[in-house]
Amino acid sequence: MLVLGDAHASDPDGRAALLDAYRETDPDAALQVGDLQHYDLPAPTWFVAGNNEDLDVIEAMRRGERPPGVENAHLLASTAAEVAGLRVAGLSGNYAPTKYETPRADLAGGRRRHFVREDVERAAALDDVDVLLTHEAPTGLLWYGYDPGCEHVNGLLAALDPDLCLVGHHHRHREGEVGGVRVVSLAPVRERSYELDPATLTLAARGR
């Protein structure tokens, strides 16, 4: 299974790198952790929305619609799907402290990129999750002189106890254990892609 970090594929170079990753692996399925920005894909792909997306497309997909130009892209927005024998769940969006208590229906414009409490609570009610996708990282994984992680992701890890959590947003590869869960921050697609063995959850990097 192909696994992809942030793509930023509204940019021509980002789109070329994204499509090259599919051509090089010819996957049956793919997982992606946000900032995708291109939704016409060569293979079925389950993804979470990041903070850089076409938010009109994302909102339509949240409603269960399939807008023009969307092919093989399946949004995980506090939902789960069976992918290659794995139950994969996702929390879409990024964290904004000032908007966290806002009802999702009240988010407007660019603020639709955030997740809110109701999104986290709906995701936490899912069960039997093997792999969790988030755009934000939990605390305890990355360090920039401060911890950029989001404690609400830690709470989701505790509630779901997945075997593996894949995160984006930070554009760097880091692996660690957070609350007993193996968590991997993925490098962007321009740097590398990954292959996940669904049977063992072994994640192998493919350099570019």
Image (cartoon, rainbow, N blue to C red):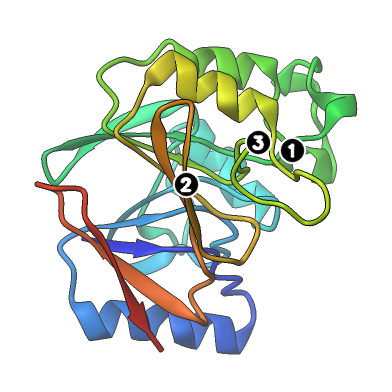
Q: Residue at x 69, y 58 (%)?
A: 52
Query: Disc 1 or 3, which lies upstream in sequence?
Result: 1
Question: What numbered label is drawn on residue 112?
Answer: 1
Q: Which secondary structure, mark 1? A: helix
Gap in Å between the C-alphas at discs 1 and 2? 30 Å
Q: Quadrant of residue 113?
A: top right
Place of residue 197 in the rendered image (x, y in percent of width and height, measured from the top left): 16, 56
Query: Disc 1 or 2, which lies upstream in sequence?
Result: 1
Q: To which residue does mark 2 refer?
A: 176
- What amino acid is at disc 1? Arg
Place of residue 190 in the rendered image (x, y in percent of width and height, measured from the top left): 52, 82
Question: What numbered label is drawn on residue 139?
Answer: 3
Q: Return the residue nearer the eye: 73 or 65.
A: 73
Q: Residues within 10 Å of mark 1 (few under 14, many from 20)?
A: many
- What amino acid is at disc 2? Gly
- Give yes or no for contact between labels 1 and 3 (Cβ–Cβ under 8 Å): no
Image position of 47 with respect to 82: above or below: below
Q: Which secondary structure, mark 3? A: loop
Can I make out residue 22 in this image?
yes
Quarter of the image with the N terminus in it: bottom left
Place of residue 96 in the rendered image (x, y in percent of width and height, measured from the top left): 82, 34
- Give yes or no for contact between labels 3 and 2 (Cβ–Cβ under 8 Å): no
Quarter of the image with the C terminus in it: bottom left
Q: Judge from the rendering whether residue 125 lies leftward or rightward of residue 99; answer left or right.
A: left
